[in-house]
Image: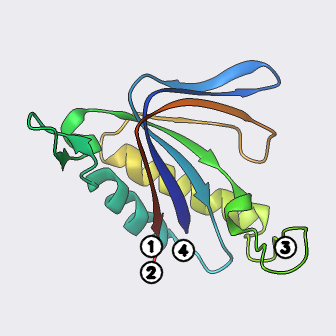
Amino acid sequence: MRVVVQRAKHAKVTVAGEVVGEIEFGLVLLVGITHHDTEEDAAFVADKIAHLRIFEDEHGKMNLSLLDVGGSILSISQFTLYGDCRKGRRPNFMDAAKPEHAKHIYEAFNEQLRQKGIHIETGVFGAMMDVELTNVGPVTLIVESK
């Protein structure tokens, strides 16, 4: 799994002009799944993200996690995170999981986060989506499974 994590003070996702997910404060996650990812990978990455200390404490240091600050997550599936651009001019998406497998792992990942008490909003799996966010910091990280 490969997840781009962005700290946000507001974010929303629309499909065909309709808002399908929106948060006021927390993290935007762009979630990529590859063929060999498992539910164990989803649990590992969910735990890592929930406990990442990327929010400021009273001294302005990044010492607090999403769980500490009570933030929400906007989770967006994004197969293009496994696009290989090393050859030619068109990305190769052979490393991206097939939709059936990717959807299963993506849903397991979101469920792992929900079980930690985190409010999750999502886009629509496989849809063309518009994602809007105000990135705070900016803080953007990449978290990958083992």
Which one is nearer the viewer's eye here, 108 or 65? 65
Task: Looking at the image, tell me whether mark 1 or mark 2 is earlier in sequence order.
Answer: 1
Which residue is drawn at the image coordinates 40% and 58% (left, top)?
A: 46
Task: Looking at the image, tell me whether mark 2 or mark 4 is earlier in sequence order.
Answer: 4
Residues at marks 3 and 4, CA–CA distance in whole angstroms: 22 Å
Q: Nearer the viewer, mark 2 or mark 3?
A: 3
| Disc 4 target residue | 38
| Disc 1 target residue | 40
Q: Above or below — where is 50 with respect to 117?
A: below
Quadrant including the N terminus: bottom right
Quadrant including the C terminus: bottom left
Q: Amino acid at mark 4?
A: Thr
Label 2 neighbour load within 10 Å: few <14, some 14-19, many 20+: few
| Disc 2 target residue | 146
Task: Looking at the image, tell me whether mark 2 or mark 3 is earlier in sequence order.
Answer: 3
Circle 1: element type: helix
Label 1 neighbour load within 10 Å: few <14, some 14-19, many 20+: few
